[in-house]
């Protein structure tokens, strides 16, 4: 049996880091971890080929080679998904599809031969058993949660890892919180399920053995969902592993704001090499936090929490939302002020998006407030998928004001400086210098240093860092590049 695993192309969006990747000579930010894990679940004797359309072209010959084409995707990849389906149908190859997009929208894919929904560890074996007997069904789904303690190591040999800026690992699934706009709990449940330390070390060794010495992203929706297990077993094991390997791997992840409540946890994460953490902060408006059920963010000094984490040596990236029913006209200035003062350089600001399967979507649908527009899944495109309480024009104009202000060269430069004033780099996380870093520096100077007023603020940031925080030069340069990427994306979307 010949299996082609295809990962669809991302559109131009913030998370793609398309413009930033050009500085480091990479094709994509992250690999298709889910598809590579599915590949490892297939019979060993089958021939397998993986094509990530973000790094390589998918040819008709590739499709003709396969007996089955496996596809996994997120909603933002839907345009590419439909193109792949059409090409497979034209050539006459059967399709097996799964992942979050298909699981949340199975009714839209009656033309797909086999839908393997939910967690692959549960439903994929059912499909494979029926396929072996010659009678595979159209759809497979289950309410069972997978035992991820049995999830295999991804088939890294199927891709060229040098094309990626970071590789990835999953430690847990599920989140103990239940924000009404988030589909994580509907997909993976409220009780975090975790891998044991032996599995995590095996996965780290797998990356180490293929020669990977760069960044690794823990893709967990909330790494600290099970804090005790993380502190007791996982982080100490990673700390010891890095020491034994003398390995400079740096880690990034996603977590909740209550990370700031646990000094021991923050210290352990910093020592384990976690240099970046994405937090869903959403809004400084307490009423909006209550409205969406983000109770873990309520009744706390959010700015103080962010600065606490920054002082532990972690760069806080943040997710922010405008458009809650409780948001008034002042929310746009409040968001700008909060983000600037907190020094969150990478602020992913978007308009509230009701995804299928969420409590928000169900509520708005009941209130006849879901618009017929087909959602892009990209909350930063400045488009609305629902009827807001404030006027549509006011919301869109306010959103554009937030983005234009935050990513203006002047405000962005000051925000990075605000971050670097708090940031305490951990010596154990320092990356070894390589020759290609010189290329990044020279390219940054050429592209960013001679770019009108943007160039002026680039040099202001560089010289401020060299004189005040010379040990953070690499962080400052990286953030300057990412800010450039954000401006380019917003310009292309006619938002900036």
Image (cartoon, rainbow, N blue to C red):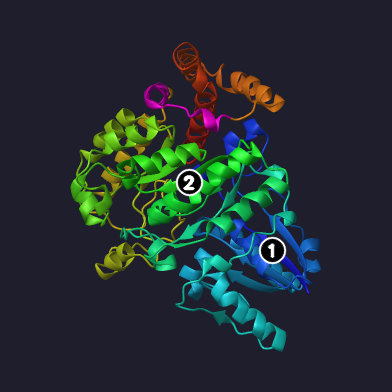
Disc 2 packing (10 Å; few <14; some 14–19; many ≥20): many
Residue 17 drawn above or below residue 287: above
In the picture, the quarter occupied by the C terminus is top left
Mark 1 Cα-neighbour bin, 10 Å: few <14, some 14–19, many ≥20: many
List the residue tagged with mark 2.
253
Give the x, y percent position of residue 196.
52, 59
Up/down of 19 relative to 420, above or below: below
Q: Is residue 234 above or below residue 145?
A: above
> Which is nearer the eye, 493 or 195?
195
Q: Which residues are magenta?
A: 410-430
Residue at label 1? 5
Which quadrant of the rendered structure holds the N terminus?
bottom right
Q: Is residue 349 visible?
A: no
> In the image, is residue 286 part of the stretch drawn in magenta?
no
Foreground pick, 316 / 269:
269
Q: Tell me where residue 468 appears, x and y as whole percent.
A: 44, 13
Q: Evaluate whether residue 456 shows in this view.
A: yes
Q: CA gap, disc 1 to disc 2?
A: 26 Å
Q: Residue 123's quadrant in the figure?
A: bottom right
* Magenta-drawn stretch, dominant element (helix, strand or loop): helix
């Amino acid at each position: 049996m010949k299996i082609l695993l295809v990962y669809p192309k991302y559109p131009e969006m913030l998370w793609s880091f398309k413009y930033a990747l050009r500085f480091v000579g990479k094709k994509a930010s992250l690999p298709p971890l889910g598809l590579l894990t599915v590949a490892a679940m297939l019979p060993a004797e089958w021939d397998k080929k993986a094509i990530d359309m973000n790094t390589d072209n998918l040819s008709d010959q590739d499709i003709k080679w396969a007996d089955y084409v496996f596809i996994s995707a997120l909603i933002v990849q839907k345009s590419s998904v439909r193109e792949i389906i059409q090409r497979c149908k034209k050539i006459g190859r059967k399709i097996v599809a799964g992942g979050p997009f298909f699981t949340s929208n199975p009714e839209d894919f009656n033309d797909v031969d086999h839908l393997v929904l939910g967690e692959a560890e549960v439903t994929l074996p059912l499909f494979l058993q029926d396929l072996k007997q010659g009678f595979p069904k159209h759809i497979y789904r289950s309410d069972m949660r997978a035992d991820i303690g049995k999830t295999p190591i991804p088939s890294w040999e199927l891709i060229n890892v040098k094309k990626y800026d970071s590789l990835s690992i999953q430690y847990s699934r599920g989140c103990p919180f239940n924000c009404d706009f988030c589909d994580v709990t509907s997909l993976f449940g409220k009780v975090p399920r975790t891998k044991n330390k032996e599995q995590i070390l095996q996965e780290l060794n797998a990356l180490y053995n293929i020669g990977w010495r760069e960044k690794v992203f823990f893709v967990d929706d909330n790494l600290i969902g099970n804090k005790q297990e993380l502190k007791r077993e996982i982080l100490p094991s990673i700390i010891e592993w890095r020491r034994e390997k003398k390995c400079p791997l740096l880690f990034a992840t996603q977590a909740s704001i209550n990370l700031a409540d646990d000094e021991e946890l923050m210290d352990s994460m910093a020592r384990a090499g976690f240099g970046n953490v994405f937090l869903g902060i959403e809004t400084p408006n307490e009423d909006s936090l209550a409205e969406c059920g983000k109770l873990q963010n309520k009744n706390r000094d959010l700015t103080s929490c962010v600065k606490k984490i920054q002082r532990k040596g972690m760069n806080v990236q943040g997710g922010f939302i405008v458009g809650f029913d409780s948001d008034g006209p002042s929310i746009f200035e409040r968001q700008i002020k909060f983000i600037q003062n907190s020094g969150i350089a990478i602020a992913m600001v978007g308009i509230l998006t009701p995804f299928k399967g969420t409590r928000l979507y169900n509520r708005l649908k009941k209130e006849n407030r879901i618009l017929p527009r087909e959602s892009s899944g990209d909350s930063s495109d400045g488009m609305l998928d629902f009827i807001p309480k404030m006027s549509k024009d006011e919301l869109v104009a306010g959103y554009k004001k937030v983005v234009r202000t935050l990513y203006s060269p002047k405000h962005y430069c000051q925000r990075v400086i605000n971050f670097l004033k708090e940031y305490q780099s951990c010596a154990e996380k320092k990356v070894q210098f390589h020759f290609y870093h010189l290329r990044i520096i020279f390219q940054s100077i050429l592209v960013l240093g001679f770019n009108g007023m943007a160039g002026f603020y680039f040099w202001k940031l560089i010289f401020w860092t060299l004189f005040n925080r010379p040990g953070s030069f690499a962080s400052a340069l990286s953030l300057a590049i990412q800010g450039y990427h954000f401006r380019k994306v917003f310009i292309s979307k006619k938002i900036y």
